[in-house]
Amino acid sequence: MRIVRTVAELRAQVATARAEGRRVGLVPTMGAFHEGHLSLMRRARERCGLVIVTLFVNPTQFNEAADLQRYPRDEARDARLAEGAGADLLFAPAVEEVYPPGFATMVEVAGVSEPLEGVVRGPAHFRGVATVVAKLFNMAQPDDAFFGQKDAQQALLIRRMARDLDMPVRIEVCPTVREADGLAMSSRNVLLDREARSRAPVLYAALRGMEADVEHGERDVARLLARARAVLAARGVQAEYLAVVSTDTLAPVTVVAGDALVALAARFGAVRLIDNVLLHVPMVAP
């Protein structure tokens, strides 16, 4: 695996792969790799002849300076893990390479950026996400890009951006990878203290309870949410948001019919975690 730090180096490697007829896959990350990241890399390896993993802690998507400062960073470890997962290139640029002096252009995806994380983190968060991913797509010019379902709103936003701006990249969203106790793998999990880590699996327990309720015939969203909040409260957790929404628009739904997304965010001290599950109720033809 080769580490490159400039757009010129990256594009030279991509040009060589294209000349050889290889398909280019991109896995955008902020580092602090865990099994969730590695599963995306392995999926990219299955599909693509050149696998590029980006490692860039994007400052424009953090709405809290303290969160940016404490975000885990260990490039040497990440490089070893990426190589083991089949990456060909690790693109690890400096901030100045991504946002050079005078940078003044941002990408905004209206609608799906506004609820849920958009309310809590503010409009700048998803502007930062959309802008950096658009830049990475332009830098690497991939055929395929791989994202995790854990960040469901982000994945939907990136799909919308690629569609709206006619970006020639196929977006693949891969399943959430979980710890043995159900906690969704996240780079922030290492920041949890022992007490918080013991309580954090309640997020998935609440979501699984909603899935089970739907499987047993419950369709009323208000009742689903009430039972899930009670599960959280029993472990001393209050959600920043817990919502059942459309998988296409993220608009709230009141009755589960067809597909719906359950999105959840909560804080454990200074550490903020998110999770989600997809609900599916077969539509009955009239």
Image (tube, grey):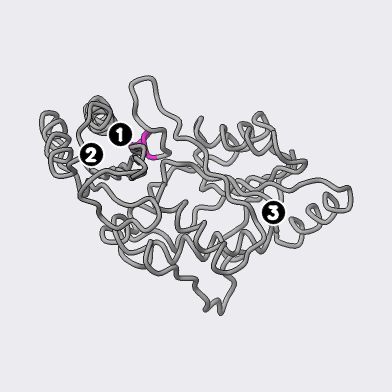
Return the residue at label 2. Answer: 268
Looking at the picture, how far across and down is residue 154, in whole percent? 43, 53
| Amino acid residing under circle 2 | Phe
Q: Report which quarter residue 110 is drawn in.
A: bottom left
Disc on res. 192: 1
Mark found first going from the N terminus, 3 or 1: 3
**Upstream in the sequence, badge 1 or badge 2?**
1
The residue mark sitting in front, 2 or 3, is 3
Q: Which amino acid type is shown beneath numbered disc 3?
A: Pro
Quadrant housing residue 98: bottom right
Check disc 1 and report its element: helix, strand or loop.
loop
Quadrant occupied by the N terminus: top right
Q: Are marks 1 and 2 in contact (CB under 8 Å)?
A: yes
The residues colored magenta run: 188-193
| Secondary structure found at label 2 | strand
Q: Position of 90 compared to 58: left or right? A: right
Q: Amino acid at mark 1?
A: Leu
On the image, which quarter does residue 258 sit in?
Answer: top left
Query: Which disc number belongs to residue 142?
Result: 3
Mark 1–mark 2 distance (CA, rounded to whole Å): 7 Å
Left or right, 282 with reference to 2: left
* 171 shown above or below 162: above
Is residue 258 covered in magenta? no
